Image: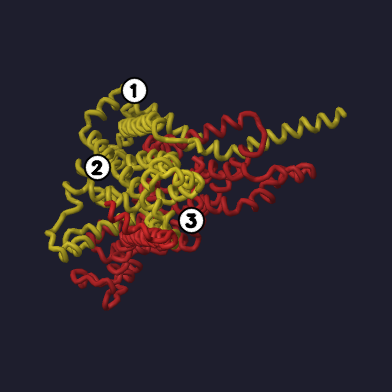
Amino acid sequence: MITKKKVRAPLSPEIRRSNAKKKEKVRFVLSQTGMYLVLVLFALLILIPFIFAVSTSFTSPENIFDFKWIPSPVDIGNYDKLFSENNVWGAFLNTFLYTVPTTIIGTFCSALCAYSCARMKWPGRRIVYYLILATMVIPGVITLMPSYVLFVNFYRWYGTPLPIIIPGMFGSAGAMFFLHQYFKTLPKELEEAAEIDGTGRLRIFLTIILPLSIPAVLTQFILAFNGAYNDYMTPLLYVGTNPDLFTIQLLVSGLSTSHNKQYTLLMAGAITALLPTFVLYVACQRFFVDGIAMTGLKE
Amino acid sequence: MVRAKITRKTKKKIEALEGMAFAAPLVIGLLLFLAFPLIYALIISFTDYTFATANSFKFIGFENYINAFHDQFFVRSLVNALINAIGVPIGIVLALILSVFMTKVKRFSSVFRSILYIPTVCGAVAITFVWSWVYQPLYGLIAQLGQVFGWGTINFLGEDLFFPSMIAMGVWSGLGTSILLLYASLKNVPKALYEAAAVDGANAVQQFFHITLPSVSPVTFYILLTGISGSFQDFTRFQVMRGDQITDWSIMPVWYIYKYTTNQFNYEAGYACAMGIILGLIILALSAIQFGVSRFWVHYDN
């Protein structure tokens, strides 16, 4: 030990420092490489099932036993069959009719309520706000069966898409909470000037607050639309027996039983069903990311 | 003077009325589609109400609740739900490691986050189809890999491996959201904390356990809470994966309750409501326990 130290001792401080730096650099490069390897591995784990599904959807059923990552020949027969034997466009139309108006109106109602609780003074607004928040704790399963009974026997909406459309139009506690946090951060002066002019509160909300909050509101709209588009249970409960009223999720899920698990067709169905929200995600990624990240931070 | 006072008063009144009117739609919606069904569930869970015979509406006390605990399918579904929840902590640990890596790598961290989030935007039906094909025992993705390595055929979706397979799939599709949440939280940790710790000679592992982990504990707690509640109410992927064929080893509570809206179980609405309430109370109890325990590991001070 001692001799070793003596051998090293003559090294000048500069060299020693540069040696330490080199060591540091090696460690840095190694740790970066390790972390990138893990991240790439997980990215591949996420992507490969999708690539597998896309390749399968472009493989003819006869060639499925001889699977290739890049199908040769590329066969669009599955999509052909999917679109010719099923009313895919009709299901897409239904889905958008059920989800777009209700999400737009619902997001507006959530925003209106959030604005009222965040920036207006009225007796009981605190209690109402916290009661609305408290509803988020209630597990959805409790209301599954009673809602079904009420929609069928009380509202008499069975066999119509109304149970899918109407409840969402009133807004949601989650979106209200998120927008409440956002409206709170806007400066008070925004409204004061308009109030002195005698502008009504609805006007102020529509012309001043809402335009300033477009990113936050759009985020809630996109997340709500994504959820409604991908919802499977509600349409299954209320229009699950009438193919004319099917959403795309119902149509695609039906492929599994009616075609006895023909995987090439199933993959074509799955890819078709996920394409709209996937494209929306690629186009509006920021809104998804901000929306999700913020719900957690505010909790 | 007097006039100004009155107008100020009426102005306040108008504002109060407007405020209530703005809050009204959401409040009415929650009353109609949440409070009303909730109370209704409570009432009919104590009756023998069924769809098929709409005129029967006899109060039978706690019979439905007692029956539920003697219903093998229901009890088994609760056990299955508990097994399914194992995926939540697994997902959290993976997401934590990956999001820490994402804060440390020099570049492309947003690319990784975007990729890992993809499954979340895809519907559960499509994801389930993709995975039923990945798991297919003869020609599925894993079976093909297995041929390379010389494994035998593995029945991933059979009785023995059903839950491990479903948990793996669940972790796979849930990672993206957890990572977004954790990453955002990690980015909020003041850099000065790490610098101070480094000066004191804390190594990377110590820094992780004494700075990183406490800082992200509120978000981790949130993911745990919502994750467990969600995994107990998992429906779509199970129902689609099994083509709505229920067996005791694959049944999940919400799926079983859903079955009571069909003629397969005689539309026994009262009984199904009782099961819904039991499951809901179990989830709330689990959340309460987590809140209790959270005092020991969740740090809310910055």
Q: Chain of mark 1?
A: B
Disc assigned to residue B251 = 2
Residue B241: % across, % down = 26, 52
Disc assigned to residue B59 = 1
Please, what is the three-letter code of the amino acid marked with disc 3? Leu
Q: Residues within 10 Å of mark 3 (few under 14, many from 20)?
A: some
Q: Nearer the viewer, mark 3 or mark 1?
A: 3
SS at mark 1 in the image: loop
User: Taking the image as drawn, is residue A274 in sight?
Assistant: no
Earlier-in-chain disc, 1 versus 2: 1
Please, what is the three-letter code of the amino acid marked with disc 2? Ile
Q: CA distance from mark 3 to mark 1?
A: 41 Å
Q: CA distance from mark 2 to mark 3?
A: 33 Å
Rendering colour (chain B): yellow
What is the count of numbered marks? 3
Q: Which residue is mark 3?
A: A97
Residue A250: % across, % down = 35, 54
Q: Is residue B193 above or below residue A123?
A: below
Residue at x-position 56% and y-position 49%: A105
Residue B103: % across, % down = 44, 54
Q: Nearer the viewer, mark 1 or mark 2?
A: 2
Rendering colour (chain A): red
